[in-house]
Image: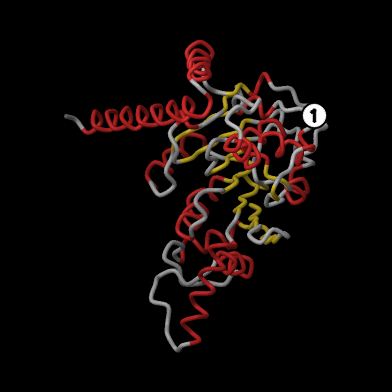
Amino acid sequence: MKSSDVLIFKSIVHRTKYYFKRSYQIITKKGFLNFISKFVKIIFEGSKINLDKIQIHDDTNLDDIFLKFGTDKGSLDGKKTYLFLESRNPNSKYKNYLDWINRENPKSFEYQFGYNFTQTYVKLFENIRFNKLKILEIGVANGHSAASWVKYFPNSMVYATDIKKRFKFFYKSKRLRYDCLDCYNVKKVKKYIEQFKYFDVIIEDADHLHHSMSLNIKNYFPAVKSGGYFILEDFFDEDDKLRKYKDYNAKHGKRLMRDWSVTMEEVFENIKNKTFFEHPVFNKSDQEYLFQNVESVEIVYGDHPFSSLGILKKK
C-alpha cells in the first residue's frame, strides 16, 4: 500500500471513530430522535454553521461578538457556559451550537471570565476594521474566534489553521478558509505561506508551548505585511512555569538542564532592545531579521491570571 493510501485510510478510520463517538454521545444524552434529526440535517444541509447567514450590525462591539460566538478572547467565556448547560441538562433547548449563537439576551446568562483581550484588540484594529485585509489565526480549534473575526472585519478574508481535522471545524463563509496544518511541520508551513504570500494580521493561539510559539514567530513573522501585526496570545502560563523551574533549581544551587531557558517575555524584550540571546529556535540570522524588521514590541498583561499578549509590529 502506498504511503498516500495509508494516510487516507488512517484519516477515514479517525473520522469514523469520531462520528461513532459523537453519535453515541447524542443518543445517550438527547435521544435517538435528536440523533436522526442531526443526521438528516448534516446530509441535506451540511454540518457547518454558515456565517454568511448570521446578521450582525457593523457597529456591534468586539466584546459582544466574542461573547456571541463563545471564544474566550473576550471579557466573558460563552462556550464554557454552553458546555456546562449541555452537560447538566441533556434536554436543553439549545439543540446545537447554532442555537446557542442565536440565543436571546446573551448577557442574561452566567459566564466565567475570559482572557479579556478586547480592549487591546479594539485599540489595534478599530481604525482598520473596515479595510480589506487578510487575517490569519493559528490554532483556532473549533473556530469560534475565527468566526468572530469574520464578523468583526466585514470586508476581510480570514484564514484559520489548526491541527484538528476539517470536519471538527464548525464554520463556513465566503470569507473564511480553514486548513489543517501542524505548526511543527515546517515544510508544510513554508508551503502554506508561499501559497498565500502575506497577511495583514497574524494571531497565534496554538498550543502555547515555548517551542511552537517560537517556531510560529520565526516562520510566520516574515509573512506579515509592512505595517501589520504578529500577535502571540497566552504565553504567561508557560513562562511562569519556566521561571519557577529556574528559581527552584537556582535556590538549591542547581542549573536547569534543558535547552529552553528563555521565556517568551525575555524573547520580546531582547527583540525590543536588539540584544542577541541564546535560543534553540532563533539563530543569529533569525534574530538579525527580527531586529531589522520589527518596528515596535508591546507586551500586555490583563487581570485574568493567564492573560498575556505579545505584539510585534512590522516595519
174 vs 306: above or below: above
Given the current orientation, which residue lies at the most extreme bottom position? 253
Residue 75: image location, x then y, percent: 74, 48
Viewer-proximal residue among 96 and 14: 96
Viewer-proximal residue among 159 and 272: 159
The amino acid pointed to by label 1 is Asp
Coloring scheme of the render? secondary structure
Residue 228: image location, x then y, percent: 66, 46
The residue lying at 46 percent from left, 30 percent from top is 25
Viewer-proximal residue among 254 and 189: 254
Give the residue pinned by disc 1: 58
Given the current orientation, which residue lies at the most extreme top position? 44
- Mark 1 neighbour density, 10 Å: few (under 14) some (14–19) many (20 or more): few
The residue lying at 25 percent from left, 30 percent from top is 4
Q: How many marks do you count on the picture?
A: 1
Quadrant of the rendered image containing residue 170: top right
Question: Left of 75 or right of it: where is 272?
Answer: left
Residue 171: image location, x then y, percent: 57, 27
33 vs 92: above or below: above
1 vs 107: above or below: above
Question: Left of 47 or right of it: where is 258?
Answer: left
Quadrant in which the N terminus appears = top left
Q: Tell me the SS state at disc 1.
A: loop
The residue lying at 63 percent from left, 28 percent from top is 92
